[in-house]
Image: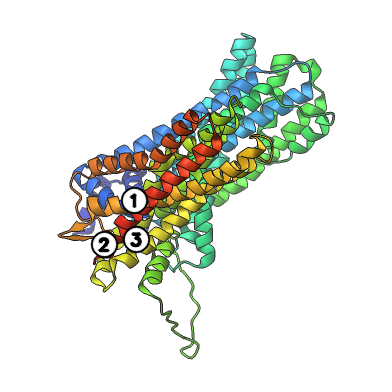
């Protein structure tokens, strides 16, 4: 091709950074989805092959859900701004500032949590390296990278930015009907919201870079990195499960109002210099207080100090923003990982000789805690009973018998789902590696025992909270002292039900999906009617787990509302079911 033809071709084809960012957005979201899919990787790839729009629809739905929540959380701010008490100016300023601060923090946590899949793919994707091969300038390459990141969180950022000034304007309009005050409030709120959005944007970049390059780097994983991965995944799970519950309790706190105490001026003064979020929220709180109560109640010092705090926060945000832009620019450069050269004399290969059972257990537990999706499946059964039991704390005591048994009944409301999540965790390693384990001379009973031990570990941790409640409540007066022995029996019953539920789930998984001729395995082989089998399995789990609880509850009620009789009947039936399921498991997996 001549130079003239090359120039003509380049002038005709001018890659647009906005259009390029759309392609790259799909690529990085795909990389992030695969990285966090765990045992669902094959299903994900199959859905993408069957539907070209599946990935785009998934990304859009995640954006919509996150944006709606980011707007819905402004309900906290609306309640706080609507309950302004003109009695105490310092208390009003603190209440408004604390309310908006909680809104900003929750918005960041939720947007970051539900954008984590795309963010991990954003930093782990190699797509940006190939941008340098295109006939475009370095300036357009950087613009494409910036726009790609913006596409990951565009709906969320726009909803956060627009929602705050809109909410502030509505509250002022409802109380004063003054267009001048509305305009002033919307202007200041827009400035505060803009700085907040830039801060969130920059902070998300820095945290995402650390997570993807320090925790998921290609040079291997250390024990410290594994621990950090577990912590990150645990925080992700807590935010996912506890967000709605936390907002409910925060609404109750905000409706009751904050009381700052006699040193309100000093506390407000100090909080102004906590750059985020109070450096932003105090300026808005001063403005709202002045508009709603009157500027004559506010001193000049109370106005100037929030302005200084806001300017300091703006400067700090600018520094973080500059650093985040450097992070984005570095994505088009190759990252070099340094490695320490080891002398051949110091190089020693250590082999641990383990039994098949211990080797499989160690392999599986290592995989679970180094895979984002598998770790989530392991953690969810631990957290789900906690979320439900926190709601029970707020219910008033009416009748001891019903209050006592509502704890096990409510705890096992999630039994089918918690055990199902556990099954997804223990079968994740085989879903990733295929049937490689089954070509080795490994007995099925060793494989079953290894999976069972991991499930026992997860279910035991899941039972800690309800067990402690059953044992502590009689000691603190929530239940009568004579309920302590039934509490111990119910605590034992928790473990028995979780244990036989774990074994039953492995049996059902093997029967529904792992049967090969006359042999039962724990590998997903028979995928026909998969959804129907999963639903049937969960129904069976619920029936078998709830059967001793329901029978014990009604028989105890029939026998004079006796807590001791009801708990003993529950435990007895649970033990019998456990023995039956154990015999079935032994016959199923020890025969080959």
Lower position in the chain sequence, tag 2 or tag 3: 3
At a point 55% along the width and 48% down the height, the residue shown is 464
Measure the C-alpha gap from mark 1 to mark 3.
20 Å
Residue 61, quarter of picture: top left
Mark 1 or 3, which is nearer the eye? Answer: 1
Lower position in the chain sequence, tag 1 or tag 3: 3
State the image coordinates of residue 112 (x, y, percent, origin top left). Answer: 49, 43
State the image coordinates of residue 151 (x, y, percent, origin top left). Answer: 40, 40
At a point 34% along the width and 60% down the height, the residue shown is 429
Measure the C-alpha gap from mark 2 to mark 3.
8 Å
Report the number of numbered marks.
3
Q: Which mark is residue 429?
A: 3
- Considering the numbered disc 2 on the image, is that residue within a helix, a strand or a loop? loop
The quadrant the C terminus occupies is: bottom left
Q: Which mark is residue 434?
A: 2
Contact, mark 2 vs mark 3 (Cβ under 8 Å): no
Does 132 appear above or below 468? below
Residue located farthest toward the top when viewing the structure as drawn: 177
Q: In the rendered image, which residue does mark 1 sit on? A: 504
Going by the image, does 545 lie left or right of 293?
Answer: left
Going by the image, does 357 lie left or right of 395?
Answer: left
State the image coordinates of residue 442 (x, y, percent, origin top left). Answer: 29, 71
Q: Is residue 353 visible?
A: yes
């Amino acid at each position: 091709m001549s130079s003239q033809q090359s120039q003509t071709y380049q002038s005709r084809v001018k890659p647009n950074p906005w259009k390029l960012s759309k392609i790259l957005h799909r690529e990085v979201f795909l990389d992030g989805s695969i990285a966090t899919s765990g045992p669902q990787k094959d299903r994900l790839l199959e859905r993408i092959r069957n539907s070209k729009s599946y990935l785009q629809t998934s990304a859009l739905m995640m954006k919509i859900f996150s944006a709606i929540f980011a707007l819905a959380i402004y309900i906290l701010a609306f309640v706080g701004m609507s309950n302004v008490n003109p009695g105490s100016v310092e208390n009003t300023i603190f209440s408004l500032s604390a309310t908006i601060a909680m809104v900003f923090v929750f918005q960041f946590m939720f947007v970051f949590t539900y954008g984590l899949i795309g963010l991990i793919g954003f930093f782990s994707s190699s797509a940006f390296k190939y941008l340098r091969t295109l006939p475009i300038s370095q300036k357009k390459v950087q613009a494409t990278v910036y726009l790609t990141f913006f596409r990951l969180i565009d709906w969320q950022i726009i909803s956060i930015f627009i929602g705050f000034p809109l909410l502030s304007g509505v509250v002022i309009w409802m109380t004063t009907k003054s267009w001048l005050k509305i305009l002033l409030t919307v202007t200041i709120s827009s400035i505060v919201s803009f700085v907040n959005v830039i801060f969130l944007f920059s902070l998300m970049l820095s945290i995402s870079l650390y997570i993807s390059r320090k925790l998921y780097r290609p040079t291997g994983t250390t024990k410290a990195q594994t621990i950090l991965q577990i912590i990150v995944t645990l925080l992700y799970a807590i935010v996912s499960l506890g967000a709605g519950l936390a907002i409910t309790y925060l609404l109750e706190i905000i409706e009751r109002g904050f009381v700052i105490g006699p040193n309100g001026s000093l506390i407000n003064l100090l909080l102004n210099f906590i750059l985020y979020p109070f450096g932003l929220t105090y300026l808005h709180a001063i403005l709202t207080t002045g508009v709603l109560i009157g500027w004559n109640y506010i001193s000049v010092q109370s106005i100037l100090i929030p302005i200084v705090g806001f300017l300091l926060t703006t400067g700090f945000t600018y520094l973080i923003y500059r650093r985040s832009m450097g992070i984005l620019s570095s994505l088009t450069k190759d990252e070099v990982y340094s490695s320490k050269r080891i002398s051949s004399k110091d190089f020693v290969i250590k082999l641990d000789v383990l039994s098949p059972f211990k080797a499989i257990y160690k392999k599986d537990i290592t995989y679970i805690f180094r895979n984002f999706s598998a770790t989530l499946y392991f953690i969810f059964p631990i957290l789900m009973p906690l979320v439900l039991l926190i709601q029970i704390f707020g219910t008033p005591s009416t009748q001891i018998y019903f209050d006592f048994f509502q704890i096990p009944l409510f705890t096992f409301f999630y039994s089918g789902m918690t055990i199902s999540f556990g099954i997804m965790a223990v079968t994740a390693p085989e879903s990733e590696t295929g049937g490689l384990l089954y070509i080795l001379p490994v007995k099925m009973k060793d494989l079953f025992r290894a999976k069972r031990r991991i499930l026992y570990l997860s279910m035991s941790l899941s039972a800690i909270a309800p067990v402690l409640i059953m044992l502590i409540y009689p000691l603190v007066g929530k239940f009568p002292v004579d309920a302590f022995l039934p509490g111990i029996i119910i605590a034992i019953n928790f473990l028995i039900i979780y244990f036989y539920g774990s074994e039953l789930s492995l049996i059902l998984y093997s029967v529904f999906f792992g049967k090969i001729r006359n042999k039962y395995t724990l590998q997903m082989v028979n995928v026909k009617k998969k959804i129907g089998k999963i639903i049937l399995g969960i129904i069976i789990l619920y029936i078998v787990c709830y059967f001793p609880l329901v029978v014990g509850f009604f028989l105890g009620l029939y026998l004079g509302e006796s807590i001791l009789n009801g708990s003993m009947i529950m435990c007895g039936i649970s033990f019998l079911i456990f023995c039956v399921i154990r015999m079935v498991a032994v016959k199923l997996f020890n025969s080959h």
